[in-house]
Image (spheres, helix red, strand yellow):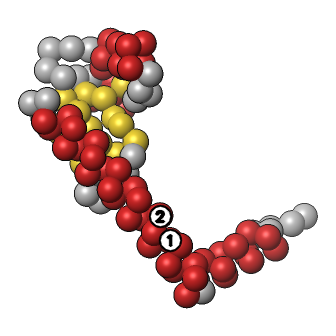
Amino acid sequence: CFNGASNIAQAGGLACLSSEGYMALNAIIDYYKENANIIFDTFASLGLDVYGGKNAPYIWVHFPGLRSWDVFAELLEKTHILTVPGGGFGHGGEEFIRVST
């Protein structure tokens, strides 16, 4: 029986702790933060209420009076943008979609 992380996973984890690894991680974090800002600003410029993107790579967009699955389907069909219907997260998410950065 084997327990724990494989050798290759351990080597990858150690590489992340090197100075080069930290630089690469920071570059990736900056990339996702910039994506979050772009997505947030784009939906906000359309007059929509937008939440998130500061401490997690997810943006929540409120579509008052619309079902999240309907918004999801229309965005996918008309713009080829894949989102997550907020209704999948419970009743409170029903008028929202979640966009990953």
What's the amino acid at mark 2? Ile
* Residue of label 2: 28
In the drawing, does residue 72 fall left or right of residue 3? left
**Can residue 88 be seen in the rendering of this structure?**
no
Residue 52: image location, x then y, percent? 24, 48
Residue 3: image location, x then y, percent? 80, 68
Question: Does 51 appear above or below 80?
Answer: below
Residue 16: image location, x then y, percent? 60, 77
Residue for point 70% across, 73% down:
12
Which image quadrant for residue 95? top left
Residue for point 30% across, 17% down:
71
| Distance from Cα at disc 2 to Cα at disc 1 | 5 Å
Residue closer to the observer: 67 or 90? 67
Residue for point 50% across, 71% down:
25
Looking at the image, the residue that sits furthest to the left is 47
Task: Give the total of numbered labels.
Answer: 2
Classify mark 2: helix, strand or loop.
helix
